[in-house]
Image: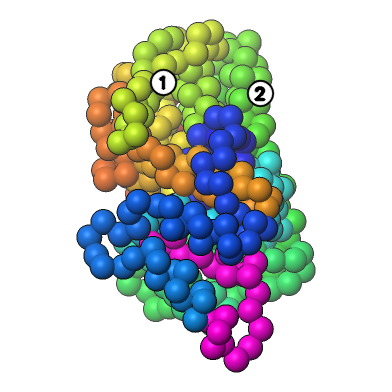
């Protein structure tokens, strides 16, 4: 994929491929022709490709109203994509394509929250630090039941993201369900969100701390600079904080993990379209000899899970916190002629020891939960435990 989730997605970097030779700007005629040339539309059913052309002709002959062929074409594309039943395979119009690009650049207008589908419910993967969402008390694992009064279960993932985002200064009202608590409405004012992906500091006891918020455009350069800086300061151990990190680029996950391992497989890619292949560590990591503690929680998804799973399986890190989100599919983004894009799931990922991330998630070695009381009091028992282990 070219560099481009939500969100909530692990994205694969490859050269752009025009995997589908039709877009809204081409028009319905070509679209219908594409369907008609397909040898199979539904493998187990009586629906025929000719029905699509028939419906179009019936509408032209009978519909008492205007027909916008461009909208028909776009609707047909969305229908084909949604029929797959995969929330991460989606059609992105021009505006949505720009949002995805801005997201991974760390520039967007919204409330600063990453969302995904979990148990068929719109769920908060990660509120971003110091954004309207985090300041309003939104937490990982919160279920967003309503968006401005609209039932989120009636929306696709991308539609939900679009409704949550909006112009700076405007307000969105989210109805949140948290555990057994009563649903509550949370009004949040949107802002322009600009977030760097990496933050570092040296904590008491000469312990390096790296907070990684996402795997985006700036991550590769930033993580190398951060690890080089900590290595020059002679830190005796490092805490890699992947909590509430919703993921991003695959290559960046490999780059991050490579800073802590000298060699070995980082992740295995499996797909029905090609033989399984392994992605291995890049040479020259800056912190391959020091003790590593990785913090994860239910907001750690996708590329975060690849990184954490690799460091765990390769014996390079102790994982502290809670079980990760469980999003182990990879999406390629393919450019269409109209300027829109197709984001399609092309493979699934397994850790070096064969853990299916989508089904199992990544389990911590040391489980530490953060309660509502901890959160409200500003306590961080997970970080406290990581610091304790770092000093041993």
Q: Is residue 318 left or right of residue 75?
A: left
Asked if the residue under mark 2 is in contact with the one under mark 1, i.e. CB atoms within 8 Å, the reply is no
Question: Furthest-left residue in view?
Answer: 44
- Foreground pick, 171 / 85: 85
Disc 2 target residue: 221
| Label 1 crowd bin: few (<14), some (14–19), many (20+), radius 10 Å | some
Q: Which residue is drawn at the image coordinates 62% and 30% (left, top)? A: 219
What residue is rendered at 37% in x and 13% in y? 264
Q: Is residue 11 magenta?
A: no
Q: Position of residue 292 (x, y in %)?
A: 43, 22
User: Which mark is drawn over residue 279?
Assistant: 1
Tell which of 299 and 248 is nearer to you. Answer: 248
Q: What is the quadrant of residue 200 in the picture?
A: top right
Residue 9, given in percent of the width and then of the height, sits at: 49, 46
- Magenta stretch: residue 66 in it? yes
Disc 1 to disc 2, C-alpha distance: 19 Å
Q: Is residue 380 visible?
A: no
Q: Is residue 20 above or below residue 57?
A: above
The color scheme shown is: rainbow
Q: Is residue 140 above or below residue 333?
A: below
Chain part drawn in magenta: 59-83
| Magenta span: chief secondary structure | helix
Q: Tell me: 189 left or right of 326.
A: right
Q: Nearer the viewer, residue 141 or 357?
A: 357
Farthest-out residue, bottom: 64
Name the secondary structure under disc 1: strand
* Residue at 31% over, 68% down: 47
Whichever of callouts 1 and 2 sits on the residue coming sooner in the sequence is 2
Q: Is residue 238 left or right of residue 270?
A: right
């Amino acid at each position: 994929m070219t560099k481009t989730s939500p969100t909530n997605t692990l994205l694969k970097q490859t050269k752009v491929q025009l995997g589908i030779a039709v877009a809204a700007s081409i028009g319905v005629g070509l679209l219908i022709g594409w369907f008609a040339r397909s040898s199979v539309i539904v493998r187990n059913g009586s629906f025929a490709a000719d029905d699509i052309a028939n419906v179009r002709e019936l509408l032209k002959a009978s519909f008492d109203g205007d027909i916008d062929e461009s909208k028909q074409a776009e609707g047909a594309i969305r229908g084909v994509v949604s029929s797959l039943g995969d929330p991460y395979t989606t059609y992105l119009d021009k505006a949505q394509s720009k949002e995805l690009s801005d997201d991974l650049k760390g520039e967007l207008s919204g409330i600063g929250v990453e969302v995904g589908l979990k148990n068929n419910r719109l769920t908060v993967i990660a509120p971003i630090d110091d954004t309207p969402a985090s300041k309003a008390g939104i937490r990982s694992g919160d279920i967003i039941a309503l968006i401005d009064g609209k039932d989120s279960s009636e929306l696709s993932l991308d539609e939900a993201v679009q409704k949550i985002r909006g112009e700076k200064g405007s307000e969105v009202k989210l109805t949140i369900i948290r555990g057994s608590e009563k649903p509550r409405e949370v009004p949040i004012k949107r802002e322009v969100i600009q977030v760097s992906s990496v933050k570092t500091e040296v904590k008491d006891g000469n312990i390096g701390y790296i907070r990684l918020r996402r795997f985006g455009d700036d991550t590769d350069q930033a993580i190398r600079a951060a690890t080089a800086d900590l290595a020059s300061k002679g830190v005796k151990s490092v805490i890699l904080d992947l909590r509430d990190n919703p993921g991003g680029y695959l290559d960046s996950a490999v780059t991050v993990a490579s800073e802590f391992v000298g060699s070995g497989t980082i992740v295995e890619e499996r797909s029905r379209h090609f033989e399984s292949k392994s992605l291995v560590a890049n040479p020259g990591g800056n912190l391959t000899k020091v003790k590593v503690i990785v913090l994860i929680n239910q907001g750690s998804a996708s590329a975060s899970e690849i990184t954490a799973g690799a460091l765990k399986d390769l014996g390079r890190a102790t994982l502290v916190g809670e079980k990760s989100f469980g999003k182990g599919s990879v999406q390629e983004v393919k450019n269409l002629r109209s300027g829109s894009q197709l984001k399609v799931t092309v493979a699934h990922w397994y850790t070096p020891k064969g853990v299916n991330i989508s089904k199992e998630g990544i389990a911590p070695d040391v489980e530490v939960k953060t309660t509502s009381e901890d959160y409200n009091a500003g306590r961080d028992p997970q970080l406290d435990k990581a610091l304790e282990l770092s000093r041993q």
